[in-house]
Image (cartoon, helix red, strand yellow):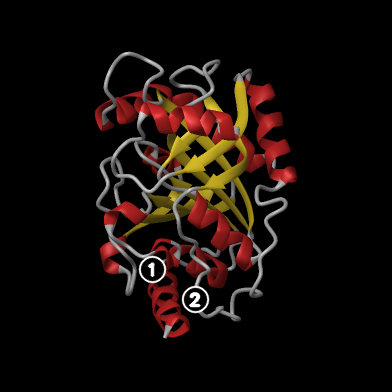
């Protein structure tokens, strides 16, 4: 049934654009503006695509955008799906499998996250070097989808070194101070407690969020090369003496979106 559903989704998308991109970008909370700069863009609401979930999280527009950037064809997701929205992880990663069948070879995942490393500041951008999965689940659990990949997926280099190097080089060219670190995923939607943040620091996590890890696992299963960038939109619970809010997350993302979009564009050109 999954393969048949994906074929329906692909047919709808390809009926609406003649472009055949090989690079895709998932745009996290408050970061969807990047897709609006694509040339000759076609925007397709998730709600119109057969079998696609619908994004309900704040700051997620919920559109698939296909367009060009300096003649490179790009597919963008303006918003993603989260475990905390009530979707199964198989539903969360459904778009990744659609990307695979559309011919996507490289995927850049972005997110908004809370900084755990106390040397970080709000608005910093961080290349994810590795992750810790504390979702208590994995999108590959269940019968293996042989159409997409092997039963056991190697995660030794879940985040492509070549793509990470391209992002680092792009940051240097733009004179952007880029951070590097380990991302940890919790389910949400409640923010983490100060005690949980202290635990994560002991585990070696640099930032925490509620997304990204399922998509990265599924992309590795599919053989799609992956990189990821976190926008540190707030410091995690207990670091600063104030409560956390989604308004702060989106506000910080909006404040740094110019630098973020410049980095994303330059990175795509360097890949």
Pick whichever, 89 or 104, lies toward us.
Answer: 89
Residue 125: x and y in percent read 53, 27
Residue 163: x and y in percent read 69, 44
Please say if 204 is above or below 73: above
Mark 2: which secondary structure? loop
- Give the left or right position of residue 88, taking residue 173 as reference: left
Please say if 260 is above or below 185: above
Mark 1 sits on what residue?
Answer: 16
- Mark 2 vs mark 1, CA separation in Å: 33 Å
* Image quadrant where residue 130 sits: top right
Name the residue located 35 percent from the left edge and 27 percent from the top edge.
254
- Give the left or right position of residue 101, taking residue 185 as reference: right
Residue 66: x and y in percent read 45, 56
Mark 2 sits on what residue?
Answer: 142
Quarter of the rendering occupied by the N terminus: bottom left
Quarter of the rendering occupied by the C terminus: top right
């Amino acid at each position: 049934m999954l393969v048949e559903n994906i074929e329906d989704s692909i047919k709808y998308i390809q009926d609406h654009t003649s472009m055949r991109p090989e690079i895709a970008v998932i745009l996290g909370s408050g970061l969807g503006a990047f897709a609006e700069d694509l040339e000759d863009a076609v925007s397709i609401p998730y709600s119109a695509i057969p079998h696609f979930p619908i994004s309900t999280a704040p700051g997620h527009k919920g559109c698939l955008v296909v367009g060009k950037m300096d003649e490179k064809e790009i597919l963008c997701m303006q918003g993603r799906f989260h475990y905390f929205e009530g979707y199964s992880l198989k539903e969360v990663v459904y778009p990744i499998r659609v990307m695979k069948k559309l011919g996507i070879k490289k995927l850049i995942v972005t997110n908004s996250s809370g900084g755990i490393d106390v040397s970080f500041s709000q608005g910093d951008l961080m290349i994810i070097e590795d992750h810790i999965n504390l979702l208590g689940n994995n999108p590959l659990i269940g019968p293996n989808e042989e159409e997409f990949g092997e039963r056991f997926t190697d995660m030794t280099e879940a985040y492509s070194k070549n793509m990470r190097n391209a992002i680092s080089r792009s940051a240097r060219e733009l004179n952007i101070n880029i951070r590097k670190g380990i991302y940890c995923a919790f389910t949400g939607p409640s923010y983490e407690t100060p005690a949980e943040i202290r635990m994560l620091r002991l585990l070696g996590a640099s930032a925490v969020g509620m997304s990204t890890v399922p998509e990265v696992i599924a992309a590795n299963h599919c053989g799609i090369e992956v990189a990821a960038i976190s926008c540190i939109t707030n410091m995690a619970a207990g670091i600063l003496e104030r409560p956390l809010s989604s308004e702060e997350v989106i506000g910080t993302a909006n404040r740094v979106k110019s630098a973020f979009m410049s980095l994303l564009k330059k990175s795509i050109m360097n890949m």
